[in-house]
Image (cartoon, helix red, strand yellow):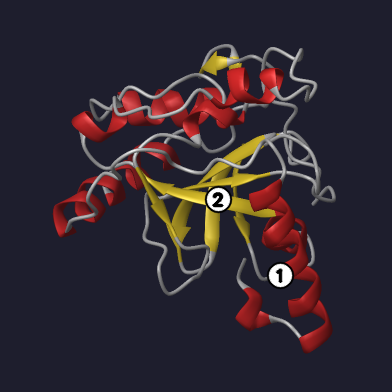
Amino acid sequence: MFSHLYSAREAASLLLLAVGACAYPGSPVQSGRPFPTIPSTSRSAAAVIPTAERYIGVKYTWGGNTPSSGFDCSGYVKYVFEKHGVRLPRTSRAQASAGARVPLDFAALRPGDLIMFANPGEAISHVAIYAGDRKILHSSKNGAGVRYDNLMTNRGAWYRQNAVVARRVGTEAMGRGIVRDLVSELRAAGVRVDFPLDLGDFAPRP
């Protein structure tokens, strides 16, 4: 949860949020044998960044999944990774179970990793591509489309505080390796998941 960047009070709050994220039914904990994280994985994932940058400025459209229609957050991620032979599921909640889990720490994150976000106690609603240098590339509802955001800004505070899981999806095989259907699990646990697609980010407008 990037806790090393905060005061003791903030770190304590973030620790509670992290524990809560692990406890509530939407927590994307991988089951079964984890996929290995290997050096070639990170190199492959980093290759998506130039592709992702091509669509900066494309408008945000809820449910959108092409440059012509506009993108929502998971539609954008899915589209970009498909350009590299990686087939991801459609929503951020389902994408949270693809590939291998990565610690939520800047020292562990690599360009091309996916970061998922959720308001405390709620289902995952947003996904972004980590671009390195503490920045993310994503289709932001409140940012009006595909853009970079710096996680160290005032606007970036929402993303730092509400990051719940990071995943590394670097090869075609890992892209197909969906180990859990989080939407089904949330529904079975009585959590409201009747919204068909992502609700988007709730960061302050830039």
Task: Give the position of the N terminus as an image quadrant.
Answer: bottom right
* Quarter residue 151 falls in: bottom right
**x and y percentages locating residue 132 in the rendered image:** 43, 63
Residue 188 in view here: yes
- 10 Å neighbourhood of mark 1: few (<14), some, or many (≥20)? some
Residue at horizontal 56%, vertical 23%? Answer: 91
SS at circle 1: helix
CB atoms of marks 1 and 2 within 8 Å: no
Residue at horizontal 78%, vertical 77%? Answer: 12
- Farthest residue to the bottom: give it: 8
Query: Relative to 112, is 44 on the left or the right?
Result: left
SS at circle 2: strand
Number of labels in the image equals 2
* Quarter residue 54 falls in: top left
Residue at horizontal 78%, vertical 25%? Answer: 191
- Farthest residue to the left: give it: 40
Q: In this view, does 5 lie above or below 31?
A: below
Residue pointed to by mark 2? 165
Residue pointed to by mark 1? 15
For badge 1, the amino acid type reads Leu
Residue at horizontal 69%, vertical 49%? Answer: 23
**x and y percentages locating residue 77 in the rendered image:** 47, 32
For badge 2, the amino acid type reads Val
Query: Relative to 135, is 160 on the left or the right?
Result: right
